[in-house]
Image (cartoon, helix red, strand yellow):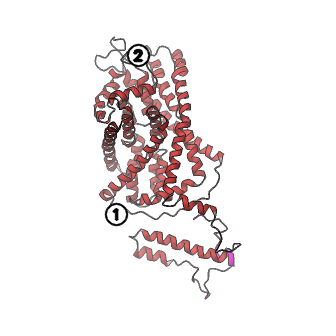
Amino acid sequence: PARSAAEGRTAEEGTGQEGTGEDGTRGGAGTYDETYDETYDETYDEDWDVQTLLAEGRYAWVHRLMAAAVHRGGDAGTARAPRSDRVDRVLTSRLFGLPVFLASMWAVFQATTTLAAPLQTGLSDFFAGPVATFAARLTGDPDGNPLAGLVVHGIVPGVGQLLSFAPLIVIMFVLLGLLEDSGYMARAAFLVDRLMRTIGLPGKAFLPIIVGFGCNVPALSAARILGDRRQRLLLGMVLPLVTCSARLTVYILIAGVFFGSSAGTVVFFLYVLSVLLVVGAGLLLRPLLFRGARADALVLELPPYRLPLPRVVAAQAWQKLAAFLKTAGGVIVATVAAVWLLSSIPLGAAQDGAGADGGFGRVAVEDSAFGGVSRAVAPVFAPAGFGDWHASAALIPGFVAKEAVVSTMAQTYGTEEPADGREPGTLGEELRRTFDHSSGGHGAAAALAFMVFLLAYTPCVATVAAQSSVIGRRLTLWSMVTMMAMAWLLAVAVFQVGRLIT
């Protein structure tokens, strides 16, 4: 429990004594016996629960000192508990704590998708319209000039789609910052402590998981706070299953297209599924690879409840946005250039949109080297409902960075003319046509399966490198293969069940 500095005064400060007992010797009922630690070290080293008993004993000793040194007005026996303690009895209780936490997270995602949707659409239309037109006039004909094609069909739609998610990132981290600065998020660590213990991890493992919702790379670095090696290995194995902000951009785009006003609920479901996968993977890995891993006791001082400071929340949101744009910006530009290059290389006797032989930069994306690889991979995802080359084309750069999934979608749809001769639609309209066609009319189920696959499949290159530094190369390779297989099975299961329901 959180205590003020005044309450933390020792008996020496309150009485001028040196902690002596009634007989004048060191010890007595109000002193701390260091042999407790020795007893634990020598006898109970294998029993993690003793740590909890030690913590409780130390707090009891402190409370006895406080009772002797601190004097309060009124009848101590009838004094009412502080308001923060009464609130904590509800927010951290076994009955109401977890439902309140889940409801808070649902409200965050629902508000984020609702408030960010019109801003995101406006920015996306701005880059697809005026900015693209200006870039075409500035660089010339994109079909006859390779450099103009890179700018108009690659950089503008890719970077534009990335920047359209800026309102989403700001709104989400402002809402999370309000919860954190109010003191509530610290209580969440206690709520998940019992959940973490079931897989052999301490409650403080929740802190790297929270970091992982922003980015898995610093989360893996934060896993080093765990002192036990087996705990670090176990956490390093499951952390890539935590859905990051890069995946969130894809969730928002696809959920907004297929689920409308329920998009926030769908995104919340994906985050809950992410946590469930972390717990499930931990339950499977603990007896197989990390038998004997034990959870340490969680001792955490709860900060007092307070009104969030706007400048603090704004500064945190700005830092998160700047970090996202800095990290994603370089990746997006590099990936867009690579995809454009591969999309400009004709594959075999490829033809352009007019039926003439296509040379470099004058070939339909589907008939390019990039399109050929995407078409070869697409049948693997047919049982999951998204066996279309556009979907597989978006997933391939996702191995490099998940931010590239959305930019690749915008790039592949923006550089080709529809095969049926109609006018090209917006990115959302083209996505709906793709998933409806590939799933046999069950577009929503296929879209959900696609998002589940994106959640669970192999993480980005930076995460793989960070994971390798924590758990080693062999376990990292094993983790990548396992995640890919699990993601495919989950996606197939989601689509097949969804097809029966819809």
Which of 126/115 is in front? 115
Which of 80/341 is in front? 80
Check residue 321 for magenta coloring.
no
Residue at the disc numbered 1: 292
Q: Give the secondary structure at mark 2.
A: loop
Q: In the rendered structure, which amino acid carries the disc numbered 1?
A: Gly
x 44%, y 22%: residue: 414
x 64%, y 80%: residue: 18
Q: Image quadrant for the C terminus? A: top left
Residue at the front extreme? Answer: 501
Q: Residue 300 appears at what percent x and percent y?
A: 53, 62
Give the residues drawn in magenta, as a range.
Answer: 1-30
x 52%, y 79%: residue: 33
Q: Residue 418 appears at what percent x and percent y?
A: 39, 19
Residue at the disc numbered 2: 422
Determine which quarter of the picture holds residue 60: bottom right
In-image side of 200 versus 124 (left or right)? left
Depth-wise, is mark 1 or mark 2 nearer the camera? 2
Determine which quarter of the picture holds residue 17: bottom right
Crowding at mark 1 (Cα within 10 Å: few <14, some 14-19, many 20+): few
Q: Residue 262 appears at what percent x and percent y?
A: 47, 38
Q: Earlier in the sequence, mark 1 or mark 2?
A: 1
Q: Is residue 75 above or below residue 471?
A: below
Q: Give the secondary structure at mark 1.
A: loop
Q: Of helix, strand and loop, which mostly describes the magenta segment? A: loop
Residue 35 makes an appearance in the image: yes
Residue 301 makes an appearance in the image: no
Q: Image quadrant for the N terminus? A: bottom right
What whole-number distance in Å separates the C-alpha atoms at marks 1 and 2? 63 Å
Q: Residue 20 appears at what percent x and percent y?
A: 61, 83
Q: In the rendered structure, which amino acid carries the disc numbered 2?
A: Arg
Tag shown at residue 257? none
